[in-house]
Image: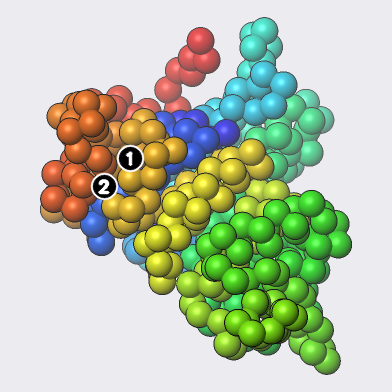
Amino acid sequence: MLSHVEIKNYKSLASTVVNLDSFTVLVGPNGAGKSNFVDALRFVNQCLVSSITLPIQDRGGIGAVRRRSRGHPRHFGFHLGIELPSGLFADFSFEIAALPKGAFEVKQERCIVQSALGKRDQYEVEGGKFKRGVEGIRAKIEPDRLALTVVSAAEEFRPVYDYLSGMRFYSLAPDKIRELQGADPGEVLERNGSNAAAVLREIRKEKPDNYDRLCRLLSKVVPGTKSAEYVSVGQKETILFKQEVEGDSALWAFDSLSMSDGTLRVLGILLAVYQVSPPTLIAIEEPEATIHPAALDVLVDILKDGTHRAQILLTTHSPDILDNKSIKDSEILVVESIKGKTTIAPMDGKSRDMVRQHLYTAGELLRSGELEPDREKAMELGEQLNLFGPVNYS
């Protein structure tokens, strides 16, 4: 589980320090910075599975990535704390320095893996050179590469790489799920759902129990729908939905073009949760979009069930999602932006007390504009941000 995140000078995140749960909901108005937080984690993921150059270019260059302010911060960075299997804890940090003419370099990088018994493995890189190396690894680190991609060849650091590279981020597009899709292995669901048919095929073939569960849950969200099935159309792939129709005992088949955006989005979320290769973390932006409010309780149940397979991170504007009885107030992080600077924190004491005393629900506070972050706590943690500070796993 990704339990601790520190982000420095990335987009609107000046000095953000948050703790995540196995299920976490980021809630706040448009433009507050929810997507920037998710994108920061996605940026880390992309830097490990490719060069750093590509994710920076995809976002419009170094000037669009590092935070803009009067002080013009030149560096931005990340510090991630990860709870790994077998009682291991990992601490991974790196900082990127902006150089003239849009150039950049990895200024510093560090990874520590420690067992509950106190055994510690560590490497440190500064300016592309190992300050503290790993036995048997002497590779030169290119300026646009993270050392972890090389060091992951060492057994002790492989779980860190596997966790961070295994995170998946979804902004599902019903139009992409609806259209005929090209051939695909179907092992990992694409960010927009554009290979949904192939993923459905692989779930049914490799994990029939998960496929049956997926169909049952789909029928709860979309009454009358009994199944979704993979269909090959020449060299393309698509999905057929089997539904009950009044006056006929046989199920009718409807292609994806006939299905609503909400139905396709729900299917995409189910595929993200039950895909054959389970991600380490699943982040979904605004899962409630185009889905009827009455179905949101079932949707949250699906995502809660997903925590048995992956850590779940959501962004939302929906009071109905917050009002789901299975969501604890400790799983809600409130996001706001003041003068272009994002604050992310648990609910403030007043909001938390009102929810715990059952005076208001979190959703009611959101509707009335009274759901606020603990700004004092966020400021205190932000002032303590230190990407390469001492690590305490006690």
Q: Residue furthest top?
A: 117
Chain-order first, disc 1 or disc 2: 1
Kind of residue sitting beneath label 1: Leu
The residue shown at (61%, 57%) is 217
Is 341 on the left or on the right of 323, as rendered? Answer: left
Residue 340 occupies quadrant: bottom left
Q: Are marks 1 and 2 in contact (CB under 8 Å)?
A: no
Residue marked by disc 1:
333
* Circle 2 residue: 363
The answer to which of 324 and 15 lies nearer the viewer is: 324
- Identify which amino acid the numbered label 2 is placed on: Gly
The answer to whether residue 185 is seen in the rendering is: yes
Write the residue at 60% across / 23% down: 89
> In the picture shown, does residue 23 fall above or below 206?
above
Q: CA distance from mark 1 to mark 2?
A: 13 Å
Q: Nearer the viewer, residue 118 or 109?
A: 118
- The image shows residue 362, relative to residue 34, as above or below, that is above
- Residue visible at 29% across and 52% down in the picture: 319
Question: Is residue 49 visible from the viewing direction of this image?
Answer: no
Residue 342 place in picture, x, y as percent? 25, 48
